Image: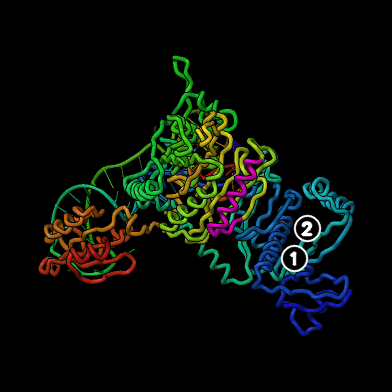
Amino acid sequence: MKIKVQKDKTIRESIEENGLKIEDFVVACFNGKLVDLSFRAPNESEIELISEDDHRALEVLRHSAAHLMAQAVKRIYKNRAKITIGPPVDFGFYYDIDFENPISEEDLSKIEEEMKKIVHEDLSIIREEITKDQAIALFKDLDENYKVLMLQEDINEDVVSIYRQGEFVDLCRGPHVVSTGRIKHFKLLSVSGAYWKGNERNKMLQRIYGTAFFSDEELKNFIQRREEAKKRDHRILGSQLGLFEIEPTVGGGLVIWLPKGERIRYTIEEFLRKKLEEKGYLFVRTPHIANADLWRISGHLAVYNKYMFPIMETDEEQEFVVKPMNCPFHIKVFQNAIRSYKDLPLRIAEYGTVYRYEKSGVLHGLLRVRGFTQDDAHIFCTPEQVENEIIELIDLTRYILGKFGFDKYRVYLSTRPDEFVGDIELWNLAEKSLKNALDKAGMEYTINEGEGAFYGPKIDVEITDALSRTWQCSTIQLDFNLPQRFGIYYIGPDNSKHVPVMIHRAILGSFERFFGILIEHYGGEFPLWLAPIQVIVLPVSQKFNDYSEEVFNFLKNRQIRVEINRDAEKLGYKIRQAEIQKIPLMLIIGQKEKETNSVTVRQKGIGDIGKMSIEEFFNKFFS
RNA sequence: GCCGGUGUAGCUCAGUGGCAGAGCAGGUGAUUUGUAAUCACCAGGUCAGGGGUUCAAAUCCCCUCACCGGCUCCA
């Protein structure tokens, strides 16, 4: 809602004069900038009042909650804690603090208690503007050396703003809620490390994460959603459902696909391969290791060295390298014959397993591993063909990801960085082609100016899962570097040699990461076409095992992934076991079914859906 | 790699200086079962690994490794 504010009046005064309540508003927006309710209008102007339902208000609340937490920390730890920065983030806020003695998660409740006290005190949050020199003096006096550093190194303005609440003062742009009493529903979540200014050469500070909401209900919802996400954790489901394991004696980041996980992977591989072959991709298979010289020519040993496992030496003084990428091999495939323009675009695909030396601390289940298989492909084409290739690729990507229920995307186009290889005209043409392709495909996208790789521009696709979290899987990268380094060419219509453009692309990214995302997306409840066990036959007692075998064999012969539970257990127990394994379909076999030559179907999550003949069941779910 | 936390049976966890424990899963037997847990018995351990303190260590201290929450980085 908008109100008029007289010259030299505060927004707060105007709210009251308009017969409105301060409590109904959080901050205001003046000339497109968020301001405090204590803001004094420089001239008569229209101001937008922002209430709690606006997402900008939530950010302000969380920013104020960060200050509230910092104040509580200062009260408890005095100058054994130095505050640095404390912004809002998408799920809450954090504050990076340099503690003399490290704190742990157990200390959070103590800090929360102190925060509640400060909320109860309902301290006014007051903005002041002072000169930079005054600010430096103030924070020197307070012994807040990080604030002094920020003022000296990062802030160019002559006048800065500070916010006071009771005895606490922070350097901050604001705006903030009017008083600490407004921050009622909050929770501290975790404590972790974070480098000062995000640079790994700098000192490690401690970061406390928290969140805040306007209502208790929203806070409870948030906590519940977090718990739901935790239950869907692919690492937990992966071991519960027997999908994969990562085992210390094998090594961190090295995945063992267990029979059920591999069953799913194989289904995905087949589905994708069939589609790619339809689209003119040619599948190849290449070695896991290669002569180090290959990687010298490609330039990887120089540029990508820190992600590569060390060179292996043999007693014949040859050097081998485990591949971190598939591209040099696909270049060799291109070079296997003299290529004509008529061969282009040449689309070489491989489920290529690569190994990258990732720092131990970054490994994370299936989402960040050291050995993984990319659904990789390299398209060799002319610069003119790029646009059409990208359009087809976007189409294909949408089809493939859509099959798994991913239909919301965020697309990023990264353009030429300051340091680059290749012709600037080629870059311009390529970037134009990528933009045209995205436009023609009707994709909305964000341009990341200068964020491309040194060897070419790229398109990254982020998908949104069932819990609204985003993941990067698909990537399309143009490469002007490798074709040149390997000197590959095709013969054009003019009968002379031309250098092709190389497009690196992956749709799923890697089977490992994609599987991890998929497990969480489905919460372990895979749709019928992916489920490792699609049907389980459950005899009511062992008396019906014979007829159950008949049912089992009927489905088995039709390539259904079916199992049978022959145990001497009660039906309820067998159903429970099947439910825990998240098997989509259960067939109950007892006296009634045997007599009428039928099956009773129970669908996971739905229950009994009735009796039918086995043919009927097969047609209903599998034809 | 860095900061903090955790590591006990296949899994989930109890045990905080004095005999190594439970539930689930597993095996055996009994039960022959109608829509989310039948009963009994049995087996299962380098208490992550190594070193130290102590009469005595799963427990206290040090080192190493792995994992978890993050930072940095990424498919």
Q: Nearer the viewer, residue A578 or A259?
A: A259
The residue lying furthest to the top in this view is A316
Q: Quadrant of residue A47?
A: bottom right
Q: Is residue A535 left or right of residue A312?
A: left
Q: Position of residue A389 (x, y in %)?
A: 50, 48
Residue A268 visible within the image: no
Where are the magenta residues, as a range?
A425-445
The residue drawn where x is 23% and y is 54% is A563
Q: Quadrant of residue A595?
A: bottom left
Label 1 secondary element: loop
Residue A184 lies, with reference to residue A386, above or below; the image says below
- Quadrant of the image containing the C terminus of chain A: bottom left
Mark number for residue A172?
A: 2
Q: Quadrant of residue A127?
A: bottom right
> Looking at the picture, which amino acid does disc 2 mark?
Cys
Q: CA distance from mark 2 to mark 1?
A: 10 Å
The residue drawn where x is 62% and y is 61% is A211
Q: Position of residue A185 (x, y in %)?
A: 63, 68
The residue lying furthest to the front in this view is A494
- Residue A312 painted magenta: no
Mark number for residue A220?
A: none
Q: Which residue is mark 1?
A: A176
Q: Is residue B34 left or right of residue A359?
A: left
Residue B53 lies, with reference to residue A38, above or below; the image says above
Identify the chain of the residue marked 2, using the numbered disc in the image: A
